[in-house]
Amino acid sequence: MRVVRSTRCSLAEMTRSKRQMLRGVLPEYGRVVNHFIDQFWTRKWSKKELTKENIAFDTWLSARLRKVAAREAIDMVAATRERDGRWAHKPVHKGKRMHVSSTIASMSPSKDAREFDAWLHLSSMGRGTVLDLPVRFHRHYHKFARDPTCRRLESYVVTEDTVQLAFEVEVGEPRREGPEFGVDTGINTLAALSDGTRFGTDIKPMVERIKRCAPGSSGQRRARRALHQRMAEVAKEVTSLNPRLVVTEDLTLLSHGRRTHHRVSKNMRRSLGAWTYRDWLDRLRQACEVDRVRFESVPPAYTSQRCHVCGHTERGNRKGEVFCCRACGHTDNADVNAAKNLLIRFWGREPHPTRAYGPGFEREA
Ligand SMILES: [Zn+2]
């Protein structure tokens, strides 16, 4: 199985005039992408349809870069639609990054300079603009570059001070041996496993620190970095148990106004934040891919209210961190019970509840 991994390298060594030029390109690129998003929003477009006529637009960008922008617009629209379904909002490109391939960019090692490792050559952008930007590699890049099973792709995400490079990594076939885990996420436990193991029980103060800091402040950025660091560690802790299967909540339809989801994960989202939660699941998925663990997700409706033993579903089953079934009396940690439900739901083995609608039970909309 091959997966794509990316690594960000610094462009900090570039001269002021080059930076000025790059600052001229990126916002215009963003404007063109947004024009194409408008054009592609109403119906699904295929990249094969991008003819000269279809990508005509009043801009100084070359036809080549316009085509790149159109492709990025198609990807952005598709990603938003896939994630949010009919509740999707039109995405906006902020003009801070540009995703280019070999038609625009190439990278070659620098011969003698000590300050940096390679040149990123950008051309055919329009108005005869050619940019040679100095790239500095770091440990994470070298880890991929030295590995003979990794292949670097001709894919570059350029921002004002970094370039993101991509590698295709061979990770081998998925494991056949090992335990299967449902993994539930909450503010008290980042990863509650269906076997009762709980990892990341220390994240609550970290999330609260982010909320206390002024938005956009350096203190908040530091706090975010600390949380993300911790998430990466917890993801590794999960895969260190060598499972063959991990089942999590499916966030595909997590979006504004979706009533069932709103109700189900309201508390979790309010405390952890929808984006932080998505980041965490991405991290866990990546850790699973690298460790050859099959990663799946299921719709999470009522997994926290449902008794995994008898199937009785009622809001009153859950009291904070404790789950106590009002029908059969089964008692468990609330997050662990939810994790068990995720795994059971994945295998389609949900027991039929003895009472369909008990007190406090909410009918599905
Ligand atoms: Zn029960």
Image: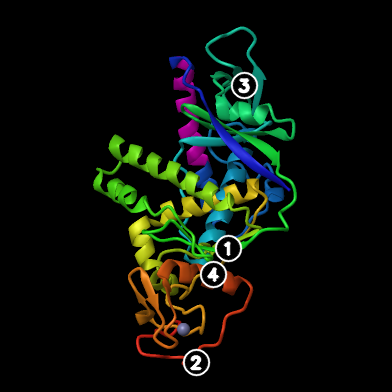
User: Is there CB contact under 8 Å for labels 1 and 4?
Assistant: no
The picture quadrant where one finds residue 163 is top right
Mark carried by residue 354: 2
Cα gap from disc 3 to disc 1, whole angstroms: 46 Å
Along the polypeptide, which appears first: circle 4 or circle 3?
Answer: 3
Q: Position of residue 138 (x, y in %)?
A: 55, 24
| Magenta residues, start to end | 17-32
Residue at the spot of label 4: 342
Give me the C-alpha separation between circle 2 and circle 3.
67 Å
Q: Which of these two is toward me, 268 or 156?
A: 268
The first of marks 3 and 1 along the sequence is 3
> Which numbered disc covers residue 181?
1
SS at badge 3? strand
The residue under the point 44% across, 70% down is 261
Amino acid type, residue under disc 1 in the picture: Phe
SS label for mark 1: strand
Relative to 88, residue 239 above or below? above
Residue contact between numbered discs 3 and 1, judged by CB atoms under 8 Å: no
Q: Is residue 74 above or below residue 309?
A: above
Q: Earlier in the sequence, mark 2 or mark 3?
A: 3
> In this rendering, is residue 232 above or below 10?
below
Q: Is residue 293 magenta?
A: no
Q: Residue at x 66, y 36 (%)?
A: 167
Residue 23 in the magenta stretch? The answer is: yes
| Point 37% across, 67% down: residue | 266
Give above or below for 153 relative to 133.
below
| Predominant secondary structure, magenta span | helix
Across and down, in percent, residue 81 comes to: 55, 60
Q: Amino acid at mark 2?
A: Thr
Reading the image, the residue beneath label 3 is: 121
For the residues marked 1 and 4, what is the alpha-carbon distance in whole angstroms? Answer: 9 Å
| Mark 4 neighbour density, 10 Å: few (under 14) some (14–19) many (20 or more) | many
